[in-house]
């Protein structure tokens, strides 16, 4: 089996996951076993990336992980914090302002 690297945008993977899950849920999938396998493969691929989020909560968290979203939506107990440390590897760019009169 030959291995190769693929570069797929997170948005594209999420878009495909939503589409395949919608087809499965509606019973429109021609091959249900293959559809479930595709869903599992997409989720596995997405799980190779993680989101590091800062969260401010005014109550004790009951849920860790994705359950936090449902808990917060139901109770408005938490919000995403902008004070989370930046762990990205992207180089920081600064804006450069040029004067119209500069030569």
Image (cartoon, rainbow, N blue to C red):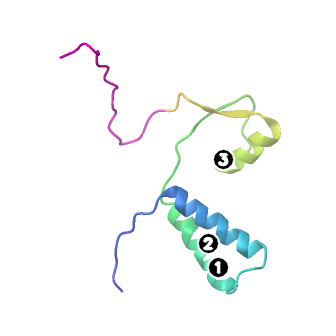
Dominant SS in magenta:
loop
Mark 3 is surrounded, within 10 Å at the Cα level, by few (under 14), some (14 to 19) or many (20 or more) other residues, namely few
Q: CA distance from mark 1 to mark 3?
A: 29 Å
Mark 1 is surrounded, within 10 Å at the Cα level, by few (under 14), some (14 to 19) or many (20 or more) other residues, namely some
Q: Which quadrant holds the N terminus?
A: bottom left
User: On the rendered structure, is 11 left or right of 23?
Assistant: left
Secondary structure type for disc 2? helix
* Residue marked by disc 3: 64
Give the magenta part as a residue range.
85-103
User: On the rendered structure, is 13 left or right of 1?
Assistant: right
Q: Say the numbered circle drawn on residue 74.
A: none
- Residue occupying the point 73% across, 28% down: 58
Quadrant in the rendering for residue 80: top right
Mark 2 is surrounded, within 10 Å at the Cα level, by few (under 14), some (14 to 19) or many (20 or more) other residues, namely some
- Residue occupying the point 52% across, 43% down: 52
Q: Position of residue 100 (x, y in %)?
A: 29, 16
User: On the rendered structure, is 102 left or right of 47?
Assistant: left
Q: CA distance from mark 3 to mark 2?
A: 23 Å
Q: CA distance from mark 1 to mark 2?
A: 6 Å
Residue 41 part of the magenta-drawn span? no
User: On the rendered structure, is 1 left or right of 44?
Assistant: left
Q: Closer to the camera: disc 3 or disc 2?
A: 2
* Residue marked by disc 2: 39
Q: Position of residue 37 (x, y in %)?
A: 60, 79
- Is there CB contact under 8 Å for labels 1 and 2? yes
Secondary structure type for disc 1? helix
Q: Is residue 102 above or below residue 9?
A: above
* Residue marked by disc 1: 35
- Residue occupying the point 62% across, 72% down: 39
């Amino acid at each position: 089996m030959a291995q190769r690297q693929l570069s797929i945008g997170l948005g594209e993977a999420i878009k495909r996951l939503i589409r395949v899950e919608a087809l499965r849920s509606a019973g429109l999938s021609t091959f249900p076993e293959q559809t479930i396998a595709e869903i599992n493969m997409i989720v596995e691929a997405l799980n190779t990336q993680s989101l590091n989020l800062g969260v401010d909560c005014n109550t004790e968290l009951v849920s860790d992980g994705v359950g936090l979203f449902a808990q917060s939506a139901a109770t408005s107990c938490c919000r995403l914090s902008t004070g989370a440390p930046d762990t990205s590897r992207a180089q920081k760019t600064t804006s450069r302002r040029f004067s119209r009169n500069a030569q």
